[in-house]
Image: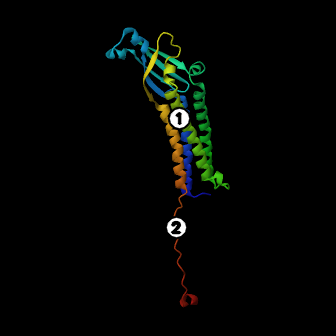
Amino acid sequence: MPGWFKKAWYGLASLLSFSSFILIIVALALPRWLSGKILCQTGVDLVNATDPELVKFVGDIYYGLFRGCKVRQCGLGGRQSQFTIFPHLVNELNAGLHVMVLLLLFLALALSLVSMGFAILNMIQVPYRALNGPGGICLWNVLAGGVVALAIASFMTSVKFHDLTERIANFQEKLFRFVVVEEQYEESFWICVASASAHATNLVVVAISQIPLPEIKAKIEEATVTAEDILY
């Protein structure tokens, strides 16, 4: 059985892995990975709008991995519309990259549970195989954190190099053309960053758990026998 010091740190490691699992689920469920401002370029060109008038043609957009919302501003007031990525909008995007982000996050869910299981195993008993010990916990956390980081990088690539926001903004638009003027990552994106950070923190936790504690030895007093003791 591992000592209380290691049990405490392995317990913390299992909690961090489980929190990463929950964070990924929340990130998948929330529709706010990115938000931005979109300019109705067609409306601006039609009325030859100047800088003070451009505010009337700037709308809002936000979206996640499955759905989102867009507010069109083309000079006649805002018009809000909801959209879903699957099954129609995905054809307008880089489908392979978008699906890869989803698959990586689902894989990260499984790896988070595996890393949690290894931490619980080490908290209960000392494994016979070295791969099931602290090294195994570190391995699964590296894999889980790396997969989440790869999913984040893939999403950023889709946004920056494949004009993800502009493609979504112009989906099913036949009369108007929208241009992205501002983008910022929202809570779901940063939740995934927190998930990857939880696995990185687990590596530190496991390293701390291997620090040997000083052994406390009780001082044993030597019994002295005198001649008077023998007589009694």
Which one is earlier in the sequence, the residue at label 2 or at label 1?
1
Q: What element carries label 2?
A: loop
Q: Which amino acid does label 2 sit on?
A: Ile
Query: Residue shown at 62%/36% (left/top)?
Result: 107
Residue tagged 2:
216
| Residue 19 vertical placement versus 34 (above, below) | below
Return the residue found at the far right.
Answer: 128
Disc ID at residue 203: none
Along the line of sight, which residue is nearer the eye, 205 or 99? 99
In terms of image quadrants, where is residue 149? top right
Taking the image as shown, residue 76 lies to the left or right of residue 165, namely: left
Residue in the picture at 57% in, 58% down: 3
Residue 6 found in image quarter: bottom right
Is residue 8 rendered to the left or right of residue 53?
Answer: right
Task: Point out which mark residue 153 bears.
Answer: 1
Q: Residues within 10 Å of mark 1 (few under 14, many from 20)?
A: few
Task: Give residue 90's quadrant in the image.
Answer: top right
Q: Where is residue 94 in the image (x, y as percent from the top left)?
A: 57, 25
Which quadrant does the N terminus fall into? bottom right
Q: In this view, does 232 lie above or below 186?
A: below
- Residue 186 appears at what percent x and percent y? 46, 30
Residue in view at x 55 percent, y 87 percent? 229
Nearer to us in this view, 75 or 80: 75
Q: Which amino acid does label 1 sit on?
A: Ala
From the viewer's perspective, tell me whether residue 35 is left or right of residue 50. Answer: right
Looking at the image, can residue 44 be seen? yes
Q: How many numbered badges does the structure rendering display?
A: 2
